[in-house]
Amino acid sequence: MNATTPQRGFTTAILHSDRAQTIEHGALHKPLHLSVAYGYRDANDLAAVFQNRQPGHVYGRQGNPTTSALEAKVTAMEGGVASVAFATGMASIGAVLLTLTAGGDHVVASRFLFGNTASMFQTLEAHGTRVSFVDATDVAAVEAALTPQTRLVFVETIANPRTQVADLARIGELCARRGIVYVVDNTMTSPWLFRPIEVGASLVVNALTKYIGGHGNALGGAVTDTGLYDWTRHPRIVDSYKTGDAKRWAILQIRKKGLRDWGGTLSPEQAHHLAVGAETLALRMDRQCANALALARFLERHPRVRAVHYPGLASHAQHELASRLFRAAGALFSFELGDGVDTFAFLNRLAVVVLSSNLGDNRTLAIPVAQTIFWEMGRERRQAMGIAESLVRVSVGIEDEADLLADFAQALET
Ligand SMILES: *Cc1c(COP(=O)(O)O)cnc(C)c1O
């Protein structure tokens, strides 16, 4: 949105975003553009697009008009400057890390990360980037890890599955003071619950696969530049991308070196699914968060449950922080069953809830964490991350609250 556009509400802005751009045939949805290549009548225009002097499309690997429309929506949702979409959330994280760090650089990452992201940081280490994994709930731990070579700090808003909340605002102040790129993975909160630009994030990552798409029918990811970081001081921006507005240098480099060169391109069909899903993000998330709070409260009082981890509960270590930063405490919680309750037998009794590894779906999904998504890392690292062998993660959907409460209640009976 530009300065002449009146500031609209979140959902209104998403719904009408396509028509703020070029409208084709009056279409209310951005049409699917399946062409791989784009032709130009004038060689000057073709060259200008290649040289980043003029917007336009040249080859589908680095974007297409349908994907651009989705990128504009994500940018509006995050209140940022520009976004690049990718085939998956992981592709978007990989593009950020690969293009803004080099061997010998140092990065600080939260110790409580999505498992595949933690695994990616280990791959970076093998390529010569030094990584410090720290307790991101404490800004002092982040500060203590910084070195003169630290190029980037990476955190998630609410960690999955234990729901630790990063010390987001104070880490933002620290990064601003030290001139370090601050990357926030906003997947668990989504821009409806939280905008990382408000805590000084430089770049925001969203796995569109989760809440923004919401229906569990399309993979996608996006990186958004908030416009807060001064890229003229960053040593990893290559000269060919230091063109035009400096606020867009990093996003151009991420599109060229990240998307174009590594090829994790979002297809136009998937972009369309995700854009349709995004229209109802706020409605779905409000309902999912309300359901999650009701379930977490019910389980916390249940005699067969030992512990519930959900930032919406007063018993959560960062409850106060989460209440201050987020519109609601999210739609994911985890819990541990009491002694003598067989976790797998409990899971097998669930009738409405689906046993599945995804999160952010409209359907409520549950999974035993240690035996599945955190199996590969081994018991020792699980313990360091506070993951009990009996931990169950629940991604709460939009079902009717009474049906969810009844399902957990019957599964807890023996
Ligand atoms: C799922 C997820 C990702 C990865 O997204 P994909 O689209 O599955 O690649 C990254 N970060 C977080 C926090 C996630 O939950």
Image (cartoon, helix red, strand yellow):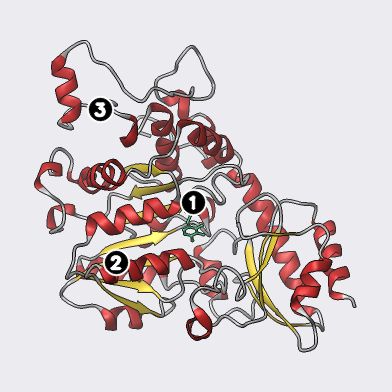
x and y, in percent, of residue 69 in the image: 42, 31
Q: Residue at x 27, y 71 (%)?
A: 126
356, 226: nearer the viewer: 356
Dot 2 corresponds to which residue? 124
Q: Residue at x 48, y 35 (%)?
A: 271
| Cβ of mark 3 under 8 A from ligand 1 | no
Image position of 48 (left or right of 156): left
Q: Residues within 10 Å of mark 3 (few under 14, many from 20)?
A: few
Lower sequence index among marks 2 and 3: 3
Amino acid type indicated by mark 1: Pro
Please give the label number shown on residue 288: none
Query: Does 93 appear above or below 265?
Result: below
| Cβ of mark 2 under 8 A from ligand 1 | no
Image quarter where the N terminus lies is top left
Distance Cα–Cα, label 2 vs label 3: 33 Å
Image position of 98 (left or right of 287): left
Query: Does 371 appear above or below 306?
Result: above
Please give the label number shown on residue 55: 3
Q: Residue at x 86, y 63 (%)?
A: 406
Query: Does 163 appear above or below 304?
Result: above
Lower sequence index among marks 2 and 1: 2
Residue at the bottom extreme? 339
**For the residues bearing labels 3 and 1, Cβ distance under 8 angstroms:** no
Please give the label number shown on residue 191: 1
